[in-house]
Each structure stands twice: as C-alpha cells, then as structure tokens.
Image (cartoon, helix red, strand yellow):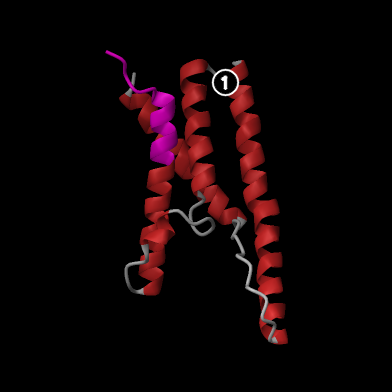
Amino acid sequence: MNHISPYIIAIVLGWIVAQGIKYIITSIKDGTPSGLRHLYLSGNMPSAHTATVIALLTLIGFRDGVGSGLFALATLFATIVMYDAMMVRRSSGEQGRAIQQLIKEQGSKVKLPRAAKGHEPLEVLVGALLGVLIGTVVFLATT
C-alpha cells in the first residue's frame, strides 16, 4: 500500500496550521470570527508561505541531510519565497494601497484594484519558526 509522502504532509500541514493560526489571530483582533476568506488571504501573522517552505526545508534536512542537493535546492526556494514575501509583495501591497487612496481622494470612477498584502519581517520569522516545528514533528512522526 502506498503511503502519503512525508514531504507532502509537511507542505500541507505547514499551510493549514499557519493559515489556521492567522484566522484565529484575526478573529481575536476583530473580536468576532473572521470570514472564511481569511483562511486563504496573503499577509498577516504568521507567514503561511514561509511556514510551508521551511517545514519542507526542515524535513528535507532531517531525511536527506543538509549536504544534499535537494536541501540546497529547498534552501534556495525558501530564500526566494521569504524575500518575495517581505520585499516584493510587501512593496507591491503598499503601492496598491497608495493607488487605492489616490483613486478615493480624486473621486474617480475607476474600480479600486486589489492590494495584496505582503509580510513584515516578524511575520516571516514567526512563520519560519512554525515551519521548523512542523517539519520536525512530521519527521519524528514518519520515522
């Protein structure tokens, strides 16, 4: 019988746990349960993208070794994802919010564009710590 790959388990758990925590934090901040859309939106605490890639990176490190080519590839992938979350998507989101504000101030009939939210460095750090924890738990549970 085929088993589910522990690598896939780490990826799925990383995403679900981080998005679940994000949902709970947003609900507490708002004082009411958040809409289900908060289960998949980008931004906020913790970074689900980071938790996911770091869970995978951690598991690869344990199972395949930190000297493996796969670990090097996962490190590169994780670095790009985290850089993108903090720098590119965050900057893009700030620009989107500025454009929305200008459209509102001008009273324009132009439809407001969506402004995707990136991450603050702390959100990425917490996502990374969560990813290490999840990757470690998956390793211990699957060996």
Residue 98: x and y, percent?
A: 70, 73
Q: Is residue 46 above or below residue 16?
A: below
Residue 56 visible to the viewer: yes
Q: Is residue 143 above or below residue 49?
A: above
Viewer-nearest residue: 40 or 90 = 40
The residue indicated by pointer 1 is 66
The stretch in magenta equals 1-14
Residue 105: x and y, percent?
A: 70, 85
Q: Residue at x 61, y 54 (%)?
A: 121
Residue 67 visible to the viewer: no
In the displayed structure image, the side of residue 42 where residue 1 appears, left or right? left
The image quadrant that residue 136 belongs to is top left
Residue 6: x and y, percent?
A: 39, 24
Q: Is residue 73 above or below residue 15?
A: above
User: Does the magenta-highlighted stretch encompass residue 7?
Assistant: yes
Residue 60: x and y, percent?
A: 50, 23
Q: Residue at x 34, y 74 (%)?
A: 31
Viewer-nearest residue: 91 or 139 = 91
Q: Main secondary structure of the magenta part?
A: helix
Q: Residue at x 31, y 26 (%)?
A: 141
The quadrant of the picture occupied by the N terminus is top left
* Secondary structure under the numbered disc 1 in the rendered image: loop
Local crowd size for mark 1, using a 10 Å CA cut-off: few (<14), some (14–19), many (≥20): some
Q: Amino acid at mark 1?
A: Val
Furthest residue to the front? Answer: 109
